[in-house]
Image (tube, coloured by chain):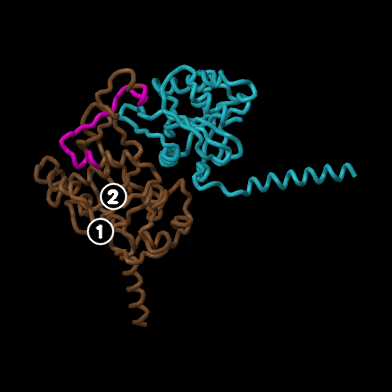
Amino acid sequence: MQKKSRWLLALSGLLFWTSLMAAPLPGDSIYQLDLSLTDMAGKQVKLADFAGQPLTVSMFYGNCSSACPVLLKKLQASAKKLPTNAYRHLSILLVSLDPANDTADSLNMLIDDDKLDPKVFRLAVARNEADTRQLASVLGIKYRRLDNGTINHSTRIVLLDAQGRVLYHDDRIGVGADAALIEAWHTQLK
Amino acid sequence: MRAIWLAGLLLLASIQAGAAEYRPIPGGEFRTALPPTDRPTVSLPPYALRALPVTQGEFLAFVRQNPQWRRDRVPALFAARGYLDDWAGPTELGKIDPQAPVTRVSWYAARAYCASEGATLPSWYQWEFAAAADASRADARDDPAWRQAMLDWYASPQHGALPPVGSDRNVFGIYDLHRLIYEWVEDYNGLFVNSDSRTQGVVQNLETCGAAALSLGDRQNYAILMRIAMLAALDGNDTLGLVGFRCAKPVDHR
């Protein structure tokens, strides 16, 4: 009898889970975008694979010497201010603006060099320029490549809910912890 | 037997008529309003550009074949409210001239259309290069009369329905680059200029992640600067009544 009820519980749990998976995405969900990425471990992921839990997204590139390190420092310093139970749920996806040059290896080096927590930070690169431009567009990130190899870009951080809707974004520059970002994370990860 | 031949020829002719015309554009060293370096020019490889903007009739055919781009089915992420809302129905033009340029289309919808022709949206430089020409010169931009003619369009408010495409042909055989609509470009979200181009030093470097700060060149060319300001202000899912598009392709190496 007890065994049977456990079975029923498991079954209803499974049904609940599949109904969540089958629920259509909201029209304004960023997961409407069909986008393939390669992460720092060389693993192929779809952007929509991140659906189901809150996600923080930004864009950067490996060979970037001014704004990108600042962006990473801001994310790290702000994340450190979170209490342990919120930090545990923090998930940050950083996608390269430079698909011609960034690879799993170069992304991995960045994780090491900047001492990014690999349990929080996922670095990834899209297949080509067109896919990269499309992701930047849905995130409201502007960028353009200059002749000398640098890429001018805005430093937007976007917080998504579990269904991929934008909860918060900011374009502020600063190396320290950002009070508004921390506040937004508290709300997002509640 | 002769009837079959005739039918075959007619079929061939109709396929020919259905394919959009792309014209070769030479490219080259080019003075641009958005220089990618400290130099005022950019080096542009040859390419092919669609002779005409995409028309309402062509976009209708695309939507009928790709129902995910119907106005009642497209996700809000890819097209804001207003998408094709001058049509009589999701797959009906109603009173709209099928030969008029399609407008009220988002960047995402424009890209999807171009992909259906095996093309992409042109880059800003590709659009700007072709649009520097007039009927007889590859670069007419230093002619004050040309500049004034361009500006007059921006100065006069557009009323009523847009006229059909195909009225203003330049030396490359490209029509309607000016004085009909604004056009999406692939890198519309790369056309930002600093809100205050006097911003100097650390702040500017940080905002743009690069030592080379972006500034506008060719400041006298107001008509082009209007285009840049317009495109830079758009989101990808915006659908405006005066924003349409054409497509570009790599040159044929046959």
Determine the colour of chain B.
brown
- To the question of a shared chain for discs 2 and 1, the answer is yes
Which percent across, then down, holds residue A34?
51, 45
Q: Amino acid at mark 2?
A: Ala
Say which element carries label 2: strand
x%, y% of residue B100?
Answer: 28, 60
Seen in the image, is B163 located left or right of residue A101?
Answer: left
Residue B214 counted in the magenta span: yes
Q: Is residue B223 visible?
A: yes
Q: Residue at x 83, y 42 (%)?
A: A6
Position of residue A31 in the picture relative to residue B92 (left or right): right
Q: Residues within 10 Å of mark 1 (few under 14, many from 20)?
A: few
- The mark found on residue B160 in the picture is 1
**Identity of the amino acid at label 1?**
Gly
Magenta-drawn segment = B206-226
User: Which residue does the numbered mark 2 point to in the structure image?
Assistant: B48
Residue A112: x percent and y percent?
54, 19
Residue at 17 percent of width and 52 percent of height: B170
Residue B245 in the image: x percent, y percent? Answer: 31, 51
x 73%, y 45%: residue: A14
Check the image and report above or below for A27 versus B10: above
